[in-house]
Amino acid sequence: MKIGSPADKPPVAPAATARATSGDATTKTNATQAPAEASAQVDISTAAASLMQGVGGSNAEFDAEKVARISQAIADGSFKVDHAAIADKLIANAAELLTKTSH
């Protein structure tokens, strides 16, 4: 695989316009065609919506001071990870999501 600048790569046609009408998969689309109108509708599941709103009363606001404290603790080597607490919270969050989506 070669990794290069995106400017070096040819533009990719949308899948709907890239298909040949004759059934020949090797036929390329006409480069003079107008680009397809960008429109997409995305439906978010109830689980994703609840995650976006903050499950369990968690606050979605950004705490810059907390990030700075944790960054400093990592930098000076004093940050300790409580693996058991992380595992317990992951299990509790998963259980809560499962009970919300099963009702």
Image (cartoon, rainbow, N blue to C red):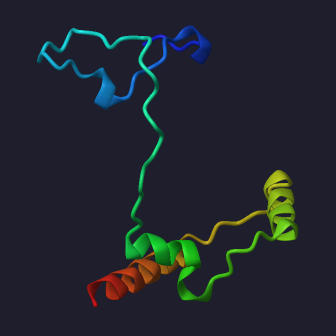
Q: Between residues 81 and 4, which one lies in front from this camera angle?
A: 4
Q: Name the spot of residue 9 as percent of width and height, x first.
A: 51, 12
Quadrant of res 12: top left
Q: Quadrant of the C terminus?
A: bottom left
From what the image shows, is residue 35 above or below residue 45?
above
Judge from the rendering whether residue 55 lies leftward or rightward of residue 24; answer left or right.
Answer: right
Asked whether the viewer can see residue 87, the reply is: no
Of the pair 75 and 27, the residue shown nearer to us:
27
Residue 25 image position (x, y, % from top left): 18, 15
Position of 16 compared to 42: left or right?
left
Residue lying farthest to the left in this orientation: 23
Q: In the rendered picture of this protein, how many numbered marks are placed on residues?
A: 0
Q: Is residue 101 visible?
A: yes
Question: Which picture quadrant has residue 99?
Answer: bottom left
Residue displayed at 81% across by 57% down: 71
Q: Quadrant of the N terminus?
A: top left
Dividing the picture into quadrants, the one containing residue 14 is top left
Picture residue at 39% right of the left edge, 76% below the top: 46
Vertical arrangement, residue 59 with respect to residue 45, above or below: below
Describe residue 59's horizontal placement relative to residue 3 as left or right.
right
Looking at the picture, does residue 21 appear above or below residue 28? below
Q: Give the image location of residue 24, x and y in percent.
A: 14, 12
Percent of width and height locating residue 74 = 78, 56
Question: Foreground: 41 or 103?
Answer: 41
